[in-house]
Amino acid sequence: MMSHDSLQAFIASNMNVMIHHNISISEIENMLPWERHILLGMIKDVVEKATQRKEQQGKINHGN
């Protein structure tokens, strides 16, 4: 059985994918578990790289 925290994280990740990446809930629900896992991993990588670029750009702009 899925715990409350896991269920909440599952729903939150679905919402983030729907809102920020324009993927419908039906597309998400029709994914195989490994497809969803790979998609979330790829999105996480993109977000982390964008965050790193922003941090580096901030350091360059602030002279650090």
Image (cartoon, rainbow, N blue to C red):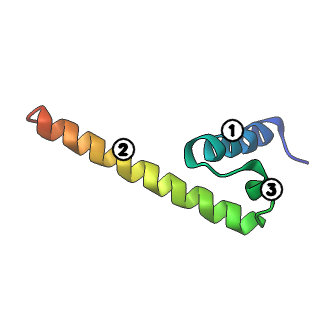
In whole angstroms, how far apart are the C-alphas of marks 1 and 2? 20 Å
Residue for badge 2 = 51
Residue for badge 1 = 12
In whole angstroms, how far apart are the C-alphas of marks 3 and 2? 28 Å
x, y (%) of residue 22?
61, 48
Residue farthest to the right, as pictured: 1
Residue farthest to the left, as pictured: 63
Residue for badge 3 = 29
Q: Amino acid at mark 2?
A: Thr
x, y (%) of residue 42?
53, 60
Q: Is residue 27 left or right of residue 38?
A: right
**Closest to the observer, 42 or 28:** 28
Work out whether 43 lies above or below 57. below
Q: Secondary structure at mark 1?
A: helix
Q: Amino acid at mark 1?
A: Ala
Q: Is residue 22 left or right of residue 55?
A: right
x, y (%) of residue 6?
76, 42
Q: Is residue 57 left or right of residue 5?
A: left
In whole angstroms, how far apart are the C-alphas of marks 1 and 3? 14 Å
Label whose residue precedes the other's in the sequence (3 or 2): 3
Q: Is residue 21 left or right of residue 30?
A: left
Q: Amino acid at mark 3?
A: Glu
Quadrant in the rendering for residue 13:
top right
